[in-house]
C-alpha cells in the first residue's frame, strides 16, 4: 500500500494533512449538494415548468444513483486505486454539476442529477479509504472527529447556502448557482489531489460483481420508478406489475450473490452478515429511517414555499433550529448518553422525533397558512433532537456484533441501504403528499397544508417501525468511536479497514 511520499517526516506530515483537507472538502461538497437542492426545488419547478414527478427525480434520482453506485465505487477503488477513482469521481461530479447548472429543461436536469449521483458514488467511498491508507491507527480518532465536524457543518450550512444563492439570483441565473458553485471547488480539488493524495489499493485481489450491480439496479428501478410516476400516469397496471416484478428480481439477486460468494468470494453483498440479528435489524432501521428523511425534507420545503408562500431564504432560515438541534444532540448522544444507556438512546430518539412530528401536525392544523417561523421552532427542535440521538451512534450500534473481518463490507452496505431508503421515501412523496392534492387544479395554501399534515402522519408511521426494529439492536453499549459520525455520513469503508469495538 503506497503512502503519501515525501522526504522528511515534516514534509510527509504536511502533505497528508493537505490530502485530508482535499478529501474532506469533497465530502463537504457532496453533503452540501444533497441539502442545497431541496430548498431550491420550488424555484426549479417554477422556472423549468417541471412536473411533480420530475421534481421528485431531481432529488430522488441523485439518491438512487448514489445508492446503486456506493459499494461498486468502493470496490472499484480497491481494485484500480483509490486516488484514481477519487479523482475520476470528482471530475465527473464537477462536470455533472456544471451541466446541472446549464440544464435547459427538467429532463436534462434530472439526467445530470443522476450522473451527479453516480459520480459521487465513485468519489465518496474513497474518502475514508484514503484516510486509512494515509494516517496511522492512533491518529484516526482525531481525523474521524474532524470528519464528523465537516458532516455536521454540511448539514447545517447546506440549506442556508441554497437559500441565499437562490434568493440573490446572481447574474439573473436564479437557482443555477447552487450547482455552479461546485466548479471552482472541484477544479481546485482535482489539481491539488493529483499532487498531494497518495495512491493505495486493496492488499488482496478483488473482482467486480457486475451482474450483481445490474440485478440490484433493475430491482430498485422497478420499485421506485412506478412510485414516482404512478400518480401522474393515473396509477396504470404496468406500474403495479413493475413493482410486483421487483420482488422476483431481488430474489434472483440474493440467489446469485450466494453463488458468487461460493464461486470466488467477491459478492457485491456479503449475505452471511444477515445471520447477525442486530445487523439485519440495523439494516431495517437504516432503510426505514432513510424513508423518513426522504419524505420529510422534500415535503417540508414544498409546504413552506408552495403552501405558505415563503421565500427560499425565509424557509432556509426556519430550518436553522432543526440543524442546530441535530448537531447538538448527535454530539451529546455519542459522547455521554450512548456509553451509559446504549440502545435506549436510539429508541428515545425515535420517540422524541415522533413527539416533534405530532407537535408539528397540531401546530400546522391550528395555525394553517398563518403559521409563523417562530411557532415552528419548538417542533423542529424536538424533531432535531430526536434525529440527532439516532444518526450519530446508529452505525456502530449496527456493527457492534458483526465479525471483525466483515466490518468494512457491513459499513458500506449500511450506507447504501440508507440511500436506498432515502430514494424510496422520495418516491413515496407521490402517495403521501401529491396524492392528497387534486390533479389538474390550482393549488391553494390550504390544500398544501392539508397534504403536509397527511405526509407527517406517514412519517409518524415509519418512525413507529423504526422504534420497533431497534429492539433487535444490541442492548449493551455499542462502539462509539468518532468514526460513527463518519460512517453514517455516506462513506463506505471496505473490508479490513475498520474494526467495531465491542464492549
Image (spheres, helix red, strand yellow):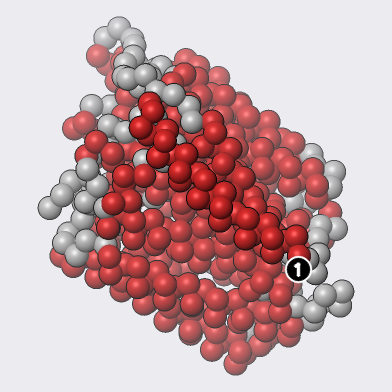
> Where does the image place residue 207, in percent across and percent down from the top left?
44, 24
Left or right of 363 in this view: 94: right
Extreme residue in the top direction: 7
Residue 277 lies left or right of residue 352; in this view the side is left
Residue 485 in picture, x, y percent from top left? 34, 50
In the image, what residue occupies the spot 80% across and 50% down? 106
Quick one: 264 or 66, which is closer to the camera? 264
Is residue 369 found left or right of 65 in the rendered image? right
Report the residue at 79% width, 39% height from top.
Answer: 102
Which residue occupies the extreme bottom position in the image? Answer: 366
Residue displayed at 42% across by 35% down: 259
Q: Name the residue under label 1.
A: 235
- At x 36%, y 44%, the residue is 271
Name the quadrant containing residue 426. bottom right
Circle 1 sits in a helix, a strand or a loop, which is it? loop
Q: What is the x, y in percent for residue 153?
A: 45, 50
Which is more toward the observer, 223 or 31?
A: 223
Q: Answer above or below: position of 17 versus 224.
A: above
Q: In this view, does 83 lie above or below 7?
A: below
Amino acid at each position: 500500500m503506497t503512502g503519501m511520499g515525501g522526504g522528511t517526516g515534516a514534509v510527509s506530515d504536511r502533505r497528508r494533512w493537505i490530502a485530508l483537507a482535499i478529501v474532506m472538502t469533497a465530502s463537504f461538497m457532496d453533503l452540501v449538494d444533497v441539502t442545497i437542492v431541496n430548498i431550491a426545488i420550488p424555484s426549479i419547478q417554477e422556472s423549468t415548468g417541471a412536473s411533480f414527478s420530475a421534481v421528485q427525480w431531481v432529488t430522488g434520482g441523485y439518491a438512487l444513483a448514489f445508492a446503486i453506485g456506493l459499494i461498486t465505487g468502493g470496490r472499484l477503488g480497491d481494485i484500480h486505486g483509490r486516488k484514481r477513482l477519487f479523482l475520476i469521481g470528482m471530475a465527473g461530479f464537477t462536470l455533472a454539476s456544471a451541466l446541472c447548472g446549464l440544464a435547459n429543461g427538467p429532463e436534462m436536469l434530472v439526467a445530470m442529477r443522476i450522473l451527479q449521483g453516480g459520480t459521487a458514488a465513485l468519489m465518496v467511498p474513497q474518502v475514508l479509504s484514503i484516510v486509512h491508507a494515509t494516517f496511522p491507527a492512533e491518529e484516526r480518532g482525531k481525523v474521524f472527529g474532524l470528519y464528523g465536524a465537516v458532516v455536521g457543518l454540511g448539514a447545517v450550512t447546506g440549506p442556508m447556502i441554497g437559500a441565499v444563492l437562490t434568493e440573490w439570483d446572481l447574474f439573473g441565473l436564479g437557482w443555477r448557482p447552487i450547482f455552479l458553485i461546485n466548479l471552482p471547488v472541484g477544479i481546485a480539488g482535482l489539481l491539488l489531489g493529483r499532487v498531494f493524495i497518495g495512491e493505495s489499493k486493496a492488499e488482496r485481489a478483488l473482482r467486480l460483481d457486475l451482474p450483481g450491480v445490474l440485478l440490484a439496479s433493475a430491482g430498485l428501478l422497478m420499485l421506485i420508478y412506478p412510485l414516482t410516476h404512478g400518480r401522474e400516469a393515473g396509477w396504470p397496471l404496468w406500474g403495479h406489475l413493475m413493482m410486483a416484478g421487483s420482488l422476483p428480481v431481488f430474489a434472483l439477486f440474493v440467489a446469485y450473490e450466494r453463488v458468487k460468494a461460493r464461486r470466488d468470494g467477491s459478492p457485491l453483498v456479503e449475505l452471511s452478515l444477515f445471520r447477525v440479528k442486530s445487523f439485519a435489524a440495523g439494516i431495517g432501521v437504516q432503510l426505514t429511517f432513510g424513508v423518513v428523511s426522504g419524505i420529510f425534507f422534500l415535503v417540508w420545503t414544498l409546504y413552506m414555499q408552495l403552501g405558505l408562500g415563503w421565500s427560499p431564504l425565509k424557509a432556509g432560515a426556519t430550518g436553522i433550529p432543526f440543524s442546530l438541534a441535530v448537531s447538538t444532540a448527535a454530539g451529546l448522544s455519542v459522547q455521554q448518553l450512548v456509553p451509559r444507556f446504549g440502545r435506549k438512546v436510539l429508541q428515545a430518539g425515535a420517540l422524541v422525533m415522533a413527539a416533534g412530528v405530532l407537535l408539528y401536525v397540531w401546530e400546522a392544523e391550528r395555525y394553517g397558512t398563518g403559521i409563523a417561523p417562530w411557532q415552528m421552532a419548538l417542533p423542529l427542535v424536538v424533531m432535531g433532537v430526536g434525529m440527532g440521538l439516532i444518526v450519530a451512534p446508529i452505525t456502530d450500534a449496527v456493527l457492534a456484533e458483526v465479525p471483525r473481518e466483515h466490518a468494512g463490507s457491513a459499513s458500506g452496505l449500511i450506507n447504501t441501504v440508507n440511500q436506498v431508503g432515502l430514494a424510496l421515501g422520495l418516491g413515496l412523496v407521490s402517495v403521501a403528499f401529491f396524492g392528497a392534492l387534486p390533479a389538474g387544479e390550482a393549488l391553494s395554501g390550504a390544500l398544501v397544508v392539508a397534504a403536509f399534515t397527511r405526509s407527517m402522519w406517514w412519517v409518524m408511521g415509519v418512525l413507529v417501525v423504526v422504534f420497533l426494529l431497534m429492539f433487535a439492536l444490541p442492548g449493551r453499549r455499542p462502539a462509539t468511536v468518532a468514526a460513527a459520525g463518519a460512517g453514517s455520513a455516506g462513506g463506505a469503508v471496505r473490508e479490513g479497514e475498520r474494526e467495531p469495538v465491542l464492549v
